[in-house]
Amino acid sequence: MSADDAALRGSALAEDAPEHARACERIVRRDDPDRWLATLFAPAAARPALFALYAFAAEVARVPERVREPLPGEIRLQWWRDALEGTRAEEARANPVFAALEETIARHRLPRAPLVGLVEARIHDLYDDPIATVNDLEGYAGETSSVLMRLASLILAGGADPGHADAAGHGGVAYALAGLMRSFPWHVRDGRLYVPPVETLARHGLTRERVLAGEGGLPLQAALQDMRALARRHRAEAWRALAGAPRAIVPAFLPLALVEPALKAMERPGFDPYRSVVEIPQWRRQLALWWASRRM
């Protein structure tokens, strides 16, 4: 049995991996299974750093889910920002995710500014403010998703800049858009709306209030089709930008392989954006990732 087969039943880390690395893997496996599966295609030596990066992103993303009011959420996000900027050094090192992330930053010479930017972007999730334009939506996706592809590629390249930043930019937006559309039913239930942005709704004669009230109908279907087309354009640009990319950085971009299956599931007859759940069996996700790893 290969190491990757074993990981599907247990841990993807070496037996002597420190506990904070294992804590990060558990978080990623629970909260970000797509990236957990993609990390199985990375060299074993790079996995702890990738899990640290992805666990950090998952923990920050969960802050809005853990609070009832924006202020406690802002305080928690400020904690992460302070930790990254070095003003909570002793306290922060007691946090296993931050301890693992700090080791990763030092070992792979990762820039801190994009990580701080990711934290700041998540402030939006604490409020019900709509995303006004497609450009705003792409910016949000870039700060929360593209940054992970970019930093993961730096980790896999050993801290050297492997280039292909455009691939990370487009790829992260495509992956984030697919994810936001998959989460549409839960966001609406919570009174939030990320996709489509206000300008796209207006083009189809809709308002945010009507969509949140469950009154989107066929115009909403058309607006979401615009979003799927946007995701596909970014996905295609990412694939083009990856031409000639070093094999070492491929695992950073493997989540791209899961975009099209998700979009196709949303286009099946009878799909209801308010009620239908996009479920892609794990074996299909594994197959898509394996195929992409061979094709890139």
Image (tube, rainbow, N blue to C red):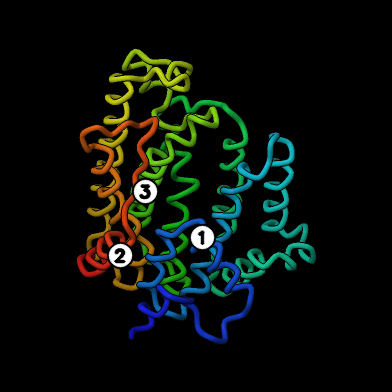
Name which of mark 2 and mark 3 comes first in the sequence.
3
Q: Residues within 10 Å of mark 2 (few under 14, many from 20)?
A: some
Q: Which mark is residue 112?
A: none
Task: Report x, y in % for residue 153.
Answer: 41, 65
Task: Report x, y in % for residue 195.
Answer: 41, 31
Q: Amino acid at mark 2?
A: Gln
Q: Residue at x 57, y 86 (%)?
A: 16
Name which of mark 3 and mark 1 comes first in the sequence.
1
How far is mark 1 from mark 2, CA to CA?
16 Å
Viewed as shown, does residue 207 lie left or right of 228?
right
| Residue with the most extreme top position | 205
* Quarter of the figure with residue 242: bottom left
Q: Nearer the viewer, mark 2 or mark 3?
A: 2
Q: Amino acid at mark 1?
A: Arg
* Quarter of the figure with residue 285: bottom left
Q: Of 199 and 194, which appears nearest the observer? A: 194
Q: Amino acid at mark 3?
A: Tyr
The residue labelled by disc 3 is 175
Q: Which mark is residue 286?
A: 2
Q: Residue at x 46, y 32 (%)?
A: 194
Viewed as shown, does residue 208 lie left or right of 276?
right
How far is mark 2 from mark 3, CA to CA?
16 Å
Task: Report x, y in % for residue 265.
Answer: 26, 43
Q: Residue at x 42, y 58 (%)?
A: 149
The residue labelled by disc 1 is 30
Q: Quadrant of the C terminus?
A: bottom left
